Image (cartoon, rainbow, N blue to C red):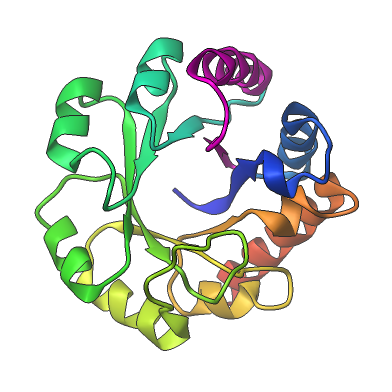
Amino acid sequence: MKGIYLVADRTACLGRPVEEVILAAVKGGVSIVQLREKDVSTRFFIEEAQRIKELLAPYDVPLIINDRIDIALAVDADGVHIGQEDMPYPVARRLLGRSKIIGLSVETEAQVKEAETFDVDYISVSAVFPTPTKTDVKHVWGLEGLKRVKTLSRHKVVAIGGINSHNAAEVIQAGADSIAVVSAICSAEDPEVAARQLKEIFETTYQTE
């Protein structure tokens, strides 16, 4: 769980097809894709997820479904990402089995500590910086908070929230194993170029650590 983690959200894609943005981002070097859909029907979500899974297969990039365990099961996605208000982790793991990726958002130090009792594949520190793409943020961690999480957790840490090419290096230096972005790629004029730039920042920063 290292590299650039794309959270694909149609509302951030500036009217472009989600598949088009995802494909460009993968060509630019993103290492994992999460599909986040909040306002579509279940049938639409399943059909879209199946298309994207097939699109990603030649690139060996995992597909993660946001929130919806049923969608992940329906299309045999590589995993799911759940929040604190979604299906409890132990239930999700029982339904999905040991082989699937499960990520869990953490918004407080208490949640970080609770996650230590789970065998999640990663925790997502949300949000590192304020972000307009997530309106229900309860806590902004900041760089010092991210460093604190890294000392408390044995899990891989994915940082999300307000991350872009201007602050990605310092987020990586603060301990993020992966940086997750929405608008920095989805809303970019050229998603492939944006993804490549973030990947270069990630790789350069890790080499100098």
- The residue under the point 30% across, 81% down is 148
Q: Find residue 177 and report its image quarter.
A: bottom left
Magenta stretch, main secondary structure class: helix
* Numbered range of the magenta stretch: 31-58
- Of 177 and 83, nearer the camera is 83
- Side of 158 where 186 appears, left or right: right
Residue lying farthest to the left in this orientation: 117
Taking the image as shown, residue 195 lies to the left or right of residue 41, namely: right
Give percent across and percent down for residue 127.
Answer: 46, 69
Q: Quadrant of residue 205?
A: bottom right
Q: Locate residue 35: give its quadrant.
A: top right
Residue 18 appears in view: yes
Relative to 121, residue 180 above or below: below
Tally of numbered discs: 0
Magenta stretch: includes residue 78: no
Q: Is residue 29 above or below residue 157?
A: above
Residue 134 position, x and y percent, is 53, 60
Q: Position of residue 52 (x, y in %)?
A: 63, 21
In the displayed structure, would residue 60 be above or below residue 31? above
Residue at image location 37% in from the left, 71% down from the top: 138
The structure residue drawn at horizontal position 13% and vertical position 37%, both measured from the top left corner, is 90
Does residue 209 appear anywhere in the picture?
no
Residue nearest the viewer, comparing 16 with 142: 16
Residue positioned most to the right: 189
Instruction: State yes or no: residue 32 in magenta.
Output: yes
Q: Residue furthest bottom?
A: 144
Vertical order, 9 against 184 (above or below): above
x and y percent of residue 207 in the render?
60, 69
* Side of 115 where 55 appears, left or right: right
**Residue at coordinates 48% horizontally, 74% vertically from top-left?**
128
The one of 159 and 201 positioned closer to us in this rendering:
159
